[in-house]
Image (spheres, rainbow, N blue to C red):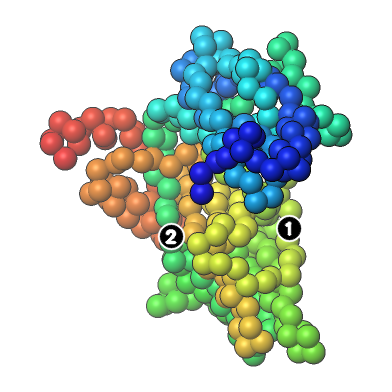
Amino acid sequence: MLAQTNASLPTWTSDALARARSNERPVIFYGKVIDQFGVPVQGSEIQATIQQAGILYVPGPPEPRINLKTDANGQFEITGSIKGLNLIIDQISKDGFEALRPIGKDYFTYAEGSPSKHVPDKTKPVIYHLRKKLLPEVVLMKNTDFAMVVNKIWSGKPLGFDLIRQWKVEDFENPMHDYRPLYADLVMTATLNTNSGQWAVTLSMGNTNGGLMTTEQLLYEAPASGYQAEYTFTPTNSPRFGKVMRFYLKSREPALYTRLDVEAIRVSPEELRLEGTTWINPYGDRDMEEAVNLPGDLLFDLRSEAKQALRTGKRPVRPDLPKLIQEAKAKGK
């Protein structure tokens, strides 16, 4: 349906639209983009949309879209040449950087009378962060098939999981698999309420000096402190590909740091299942910066070496990745 001009609208419709548009104000906005070190990011591309007033059943013109780039100080501004009710910062991007979008900083209202009306201040621009992608730091051991499953017969009993061997631990007094010892990095105790059919889950660690924490943030370094002995929650079914819960784990002695993304939860009166992905730093430090764009055979070898060392109770030596990458390129890999 084509947009109608005010002149072609019935009088009552034209008046209603005029009243709605009367709440619009010039959209003025000041922003600044910096990286994780606080350095202004020049040339960041800003995409924004201005929402304007309309009335039901009367299509309006396309929403004005704004494309800007930050200056040498990482700053950008919207000058007020367009009136509207709301401003949406749709995207901030630059090659070689990753957007870190804080909640509550992408929607601003300008409607007259709104209690949350945005007041622009050129001396205090809204700060946005782009994370500068660094050189690859560490080869993380990645397991995309993490799963812990408890049926109703096991309700109330602890179930452990060895993050290195990727195997469940049921016998905590004699943890073995294929005649090899297991370690319960993560322990889940799931209890079924037979009256309501509802599960309750407690996650804890297999050693007294370990701990876990949950956060919505994607951290590139596991926290140094703030871990707790256990975490309890009431699970509900979740869609398969939506991030549900993110944990950072500290297990073993000396410490081994892991990121766990629980990507799916399946609950029924018969069974509880947690599924997700783990990233483990096998070298014992807190760095969770995953090395990317490594030659496939080099990545496979380094992960295999790390896993083999950990299975024998040792810590692998952290590789010199820039050197290995350079050597691989010289060999034409």
Q: Position of residue 324 (x, y in %)?
A: 26, 35
Frontmost residue, 180 versus 292 = 292
- Displayed quadrant of residue 169: bottom right
* Residue on which disc 2 sits: 143
The answer to which of 1 and 127 lies nearer the viewer is 1
Q: Secondary structure at mark 1?
A: loop
Q: How would you rate the neighbour count of disc 1 (Cα within 10 Å): few for under 14, some for 14-19, many for 20 or more?
A: some
The crowd level at tag 2 (other Cα within 10 Å; few <14, some 14-19, many 20+) is some
Figure quadrant of the C terminus: top left
Q: Amino acid at mark 1?
A: Ala
- Mark 1 highlights which residue? 229
Nearest to viewer (mark 2 / mark 1)? 2
Q: Position of residue 325 (x, y in %)?
A: 26, 34
Q: Is residue 168 something that shows in the picture?
A: yes
**Mark nearer the N terminus (2 vs 1):** 2
Residue 16 is left or right of residue 43, and the answer is right
